[in-house]
Image: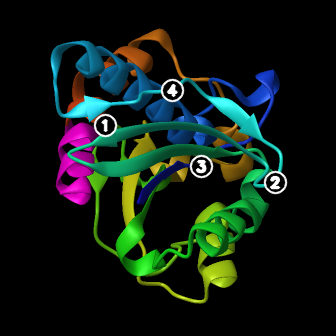
Amino acid sequence: MKLIIGLGNPGKKYQNTRHNLGFLVIEKLRQYFQEKNYTSSEIKNFSSFKFEKRFNAEIASYVIKNEKVLLIMPQTFMNNSGEAILKLVQFYKLNPQKDIIVIYDDIDLPFGKIRTKGQSAGGHRGMDSIIQALGTKMISRIRCGILSRPKNEIQDTSKFVLQNFTKSELEIILKDIMPQVILEIEKFIE
């Protein structure tokens, strides 16, 4: 079993904010796998997102190449993401170093770029919560850049990450970020 986790904050207030890029990517992944479900014999048993109270997370599942995969959006707030992930890892008896990948926003990367390397949280409180809860830094990750202007022009980082994406930024997410993420997710599943 593999867990693909997108980080964000629950609720409509945060829906299209930069800090919710992980949720947005997970929703787009679900659409991608749902479409492939109709054209590929490798993807089966696709489900829509459903709130799982015991994990405090929205979860969709499918089977790809005989591997069960869960798409997860923790419904804790960002800073407590580790609570939901720990429950999932313990329940399914998973190895965090091999069986999970976390997708989240990174203000230190230019908008539209992704990075998969790193072992620290890099100041990201959601990732820090997961590292603390699981007791390891050796977690696969996809960091998606949200820095759309010079960092020295951003006076309040917390306000910046809670701003909504512009229409052109949402187009870049679909055109540039999603193909990169899909490639990394397919490598992770294999």
Specify the quadrant of the image occupied by residue 129. Answer: bottom right
Q: Which mark is residue 7?
A: 3
Which residue appears at 39% of the width and 46% of the height? 145
Which residue appears at 79% of the width and 49% of the height? 56
Q: Given this view, does label 2 or label 1 mark the residue nearer the observer?
A: 2
- Mark 2, secondary structure of its residue: loop
Marks 2,1: beta carbons within 8 A: no
Q: Which residues are magenta?
A: 180-190
How are the colours assigned in the image? rainbow
The residue carrying mark 2 is 54
- Mark 3, secondary structure of its residue: loop
Q: Amino acid at mark 1?
A: Gly
Q: CA distance from mark 2 to mark 1?
A: 34 Å
Question: Which tag, 2 or 4, sits closer to the chain's start?
Answer: 4
Q: Which residue is at the front of the view, 181 or 73?
A: 73
Q: Could you classify mark 1 by the number of other residues whose Cα lies within 10 Å: few (under 14), some (14-19), or many (20 or more)?
A: some
Q: Which mark is residue 112?
A: 1
Q: Amino acid at mark 3?
A: Leu
